[in-house]
Image (spheres, helix red, strand yellow):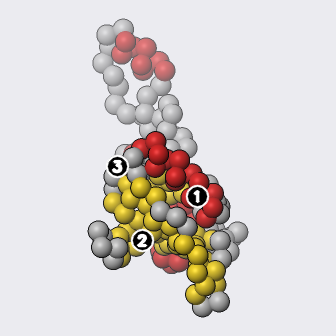
Amino acid sequence: MKTEKKSCETCLYMATHEKCDGCLHTKEDYELFRNGSEMPPFRYLYYKDGNWLGRSMLYELTGKQNIVIGGTGEAEVNIKQKPSEVSKHLHYVAEQCGYIVGTLHKSRVNEADVVSLKISTSEGTFRLIWHDNQLDRIERLDQQGNIIDSFWDRQNIRDTLQTFDNSTDPLVSNYNDGLT
């Protein structure tokens, strides 16, 4: 992947912000600006051309990054959490932020234990679904509880990652390693 012009949107670290601090300007730039000089153009000191979306997807699949369901990150889930842990966290968030969270629903489908949980946030209503204690997908629902679309889907993300050229990112280029 080769980008013509450097920008935050084309940087490998955009979604994860691992190397954003001090990337655009140095401490000296800010000091000169405070003393009346003009701020120089963005420096992009830690810029790395790459697929930030692929990196973000991989981080969500491995639990290195939370999946934000609603708001500015209050309602979030980590793929490593068990349904009971997610429910406890989201009930706490709901109490603080005015969201609505249902109770865990357990069933058995095709010889798998299936657990689901609904949450209504400022972004809409969602249903989280686990198969055998692994987060499988998050569906966005309409007011009647019908599925609008898939907000997050483990298999869809895996399939999508296979289509990306991640050769510039050592963390993502071998994304199959370690994923089960």
Q: Position of residue 165 (x, y in %)?
A: 50, 69
Q: Does residue 48 appear in this view?
A: no
Residue at left 42%, top 71%? 139
The secondary element bearing badge 3 is classed as loop
> Residue drawn at (49%, 21%), measured in percent from left and top?
27
SS of the residue under disc 1:
helix
The residue positioned 43% from the left and 14% from the top of the image is 31
Image quarter in which the N terminus is found: bottom left
User: Marks 2 and 1, how far apart in space?
Assistant: 16 Å
x%, y% of residue 57? 51, 63
Task: Tell me which residue sits at (70%, 69%) in the image.
Answer: 178
Nearest to the eye among marks 3 and 2: give it. Answer: 2
* Position above or below: 89 against 161: above
The kind of residue on which mark 3 rests is Lys
Where, quadrant-wise, is the C terminus in this rendering? bottom right
Mark nearest the camera among 1 and 3 is 1
Residue marked by disc 2: 139
Which residue matches tag 1? 86
Q: Residue tagged by mark 3?
A: 5
Name the residue type under label 2.
Glu
The quarter of the displayed image where residue 105 is located:
bottom right
The x and y percentages for residue 161 are 51, 71
**Between disc 2 and disc 1, whose residue precedes?**
1
Foreground residue among 159 and 101: 101
Q: CA distance from mark 1 to mark 3?
A: 41 Å
